[in-house]
Amino acid sequence: MATALITGPATGIGRAFADKLALEGYDLVLVSRDEAKLKEVAADVTRLHGVECEVLAADLTDADDLARVEERFRTGPIEVLVNNAGFGQKKPFWANPVDVEEKQLDLLVRVVLRLTHAAVLPMIERGSGAVINVSSVAGFLQRNVYSAHKAWVTNFSAGLALELHAKGVAVMALCPGFVHTEFHERMGMDKSLIPSFMWLDATDLVDAAWKDLMRGKPISIPSRRYKLIVAGTRFIPRALIARVSTVGLDGRRRG
């Protein structure tokens, strides 16, 4: 049976990916800092779907822990990687200690780069495999450092998809908008400020993303409303985009 590795699988989008990939018949490797929570998720997924779940507790911003996760790609075949671990900041860039900003940069950019690199090398040798890097609609907007990180993830993934398509390896950036998860409560965000039609369900989001991956799309923007928003960024004046970009468009938590 094929195996998928998911970072940040405990709740929200990551948990939806765990259920989806289990339904597709994949055994799972679940990666997060909280070993106790991972074991709960693993037991639940196994009970619901009958697949094997391996728990790999790791702080991906720690060099030694990251190296252990990279090594997992060499010790057994991983057919699908989902880079979903996230990081949110309540304060603006200048109000945070620079080491906290560096942790966000590490998790949202450096970890994505390193795990993708570790994953695609054996995938190229086998001639098959897929990487889904969870990005954000925020990457298409001007929204401080987080937006810049997500813009990198989207462009990195789309460019790599073009290079690896002929080698049988699929790479896709998933760019959600507002998703019903625990992220916004943890950030102290007032969800009532966001119109109800802007919210997405994590399960529906992942189902749409999986279909896009099967179709070979390098970028997945689930739902027509968010496709229109992204398309509009090409024509809407930059000053107006800046005004509507003051609230985060993402549903992830730190993994």
Image: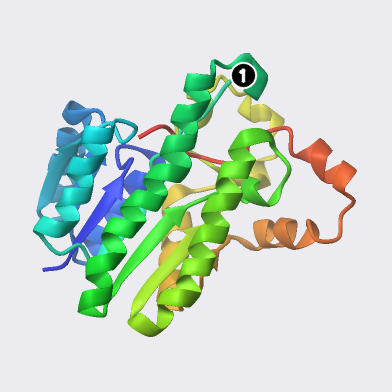
Residue 154: percent from left, percent from top: 55, 57
Which residue corresponds to the image point at 16% horizontal and 67% vertical from the top-left?
2
For the C terminus, which image quadrant? top left
Marker count (numbered): 1
Q: Nearer the viewer, residue 237 or 67?
A: 67
Image vertical order of residue 159 relative to residue 142, above or below = below
Image vertical order of residue 15 relative to residue 166, above or below = above
As drawn, is 95 to the left or to the right of 157?
right
For the N terminus, which image quadrant? bottom left
Residue 114: percent from left, percent from top: 35, 50
Residue 168 visible within the image: yes
Q: What residue type is labelled 1?
A: Lys
Image vertical order of residue 243 relative to residue 50, above or below = above
Residue ID for mark 1: 91
- SS for callout 1: loop
The crowd level at tag 1 (other Cα within 10 Å; few <14, some 14-19, many 20+) is: few
